[in-house]
């Protein structure tokens, strides 16, 4: 059965964000979990479904349905992992192309979760539920590069909170079609689910705040090799933002041309750098994921280095 919760907010000294208030009232539920429950329509304030950024003033009646986790037997699978760094709290992985992060329809035994379950055993955080043990954030199946895996709930909650306030450095490499007019710039366009195709995201004035900073690293033959710095981390953010400028990522069948002149599997995008405050030592750490072989070969073919 679901866990049904309710409370009435007392008078507050100052307006307080809904997610911040509930994190203190119900500390067993993380902000990321609350966001998911809100998106599923399980959170109500005065009978209406709110955004977790709603400012509470006092007197509101809040109800929350927390479903029991569905039993799921994810099988640990011995698959090679490109481990950049590992300690008792975190594991930094360089994810290969064509690898799904967590189990879904059609992918039950070939995901990153299967591999890290084999590698870590029961040393993984459980905050994101049984389907996503240790997973703080994710990248698309055809995007390569650095991912943080958490081995305990303390580390997971710490880094999830850092992600919420955009306090994690994330730098990507990607090749876009054509030449950008400016060698550097910022795309500040809100994103939301595409109203015509639920598999896609789209620029939407009523969507969530999204900011991408870009810089051209080298001009190629008909393409630009770029660096992207994420100020926010929305689904498909770089892919949608660059397509909105008329320069989609090379190989991206969802936001770019259906046909690609090169034998690529999805978009040419790599999570090159991830940097953050370590959850235990509180030291600044920064990890780089080497460019995949296909990307290096493509650069050479396009006249780059």
Image (spheres, rainbow, N blue to C red):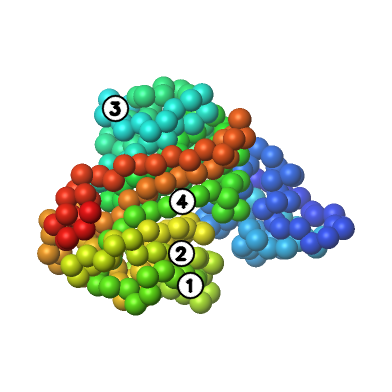
Residues at marks 1 and 3, CA–CA distance in whole angstroms: 40 Å
Q: Nearer the viewer, mark 1 or mark 4?
A: 4
| Distance from Cα at disc 2 to Cα at disc 1 | 9 Å
- Residue lying at 27% horizontally and 25% vertically, measured from the top left: 78
| Residue position for label 4 | 170
Q: Secondary structure at mark 1?
A: loop
Give the answer, above or below, for where 22 lies relative to 149.
Answer: below
Mark 3: which secondary structure? loop
- Mark 1: give few (<14), some (14-19) or many (20+) Cα within 10 Å: some
Q: How far apart are labels 3 and 4 at the CA level?
A: 29 Å
Where is residue 32 shown, x and y percent of the image? 56, 48
Of residue 19 and residue 98, the one placed in the foreground of this image is 98
Mark before the other along the chain sequence, 1 or 3: 3
Query: N-terminal of the two: label 2 or label 3?
Result: 3
Q: Answer yes or no: do the residues labelled 1 and 3 have beta carbons within 8 Å?
A: no
Task: Please give left or right for residue 208 compared with residue 223 in the image.
Answer: right
The vertical placement of 122 against 114, above or below, is above
Whole-angstrom CA distance, mark 1 to mark 4, is: 18 Å
> Which of 65/212 is in front?
212
- Residue identified by numbered label 2: 212
Q: Earlier in the sequence, mark 3 or mark 4?
A: 3
Q: Which residue is mark 1?
A: 189
List x then y, in percent, for residue 204: 47, 74
277 horizontally vs 110: left or right:
right
Provide the residue designation for mark 3. Answer: 77
Q: How dense is the environment of label 3, judged by Cα within 10 Å: few (below 14), some, or many (20 and up)?
A: some
> Is disc 2 surrounded by few (<14), some (14 to 19) or many (20+) residues within 10 Å?
many
Distance in Å between CA atoms under marks 2 and 4: 11 Å
Q: Quadrant of residue 2?
A: top right
Helix, strand or loop at mark 4: strand
């Amino acid at each position: 059965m679901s866990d049904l919760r309710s409370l009435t907010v007392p008078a507050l000294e100052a307006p307080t964000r809904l997610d911040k208030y509930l994190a203190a009232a119900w500390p067993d539920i993380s902000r990321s979990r609350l966001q998911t429950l809100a998106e599923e329509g399980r959170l109500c304030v005065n009978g209406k479904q709110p955004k977790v950024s709603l400012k509470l003033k006092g007197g509101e009646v809040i109800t929350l349905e927390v479903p029991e986790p569905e039993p799921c037997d994810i099988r640990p699978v011995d698959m090679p992992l490109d481990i950049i760094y590992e300690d008792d709290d975190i594991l930094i992985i360089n994810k290969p192309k064509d690898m799904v992060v967590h189990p879904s329809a059609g992918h039950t035994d070939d995901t990153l979760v299967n591999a890290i379950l084999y590698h870590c055993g029961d040393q993984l955080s459980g905050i994101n539920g049984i389907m996503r043990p240790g997973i703080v954030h994710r990248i698309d199946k055809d995007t390569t590069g650095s991912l943080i895996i958490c081995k305990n709930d303390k580390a997971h909650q710490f880094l999830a909170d850092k992600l919420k306030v955009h306090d994690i450095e994330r730098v990507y490499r990607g090749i876009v079609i054509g030449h950008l007019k400016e060698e550097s710039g910022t795309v500040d366009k809100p994103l939301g689910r595409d109203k015509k195709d639920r598999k896609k995201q789209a620029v939407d004035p009523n969507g969530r705040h999204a900011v991408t900073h870009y810089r051209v690293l080298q001009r190629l033959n008909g393409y630009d090799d770029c660096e992207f710095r994420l100020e926010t981390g929305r689904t498909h953010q770089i892919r949608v933002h660059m397509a909105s400028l008329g320069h989609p990522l090379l190989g991206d069948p969802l936001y770019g041309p259906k046909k690609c002149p090169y034998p690529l599997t999805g978009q040419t995008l790599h999570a090159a750098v991830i940097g953050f405050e370590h959850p235990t030592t509180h030291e600044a750490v920064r990890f780089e994921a080497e460019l995949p072989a296909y990307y290096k070969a493509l650069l050479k073919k396009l006249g780059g280095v």
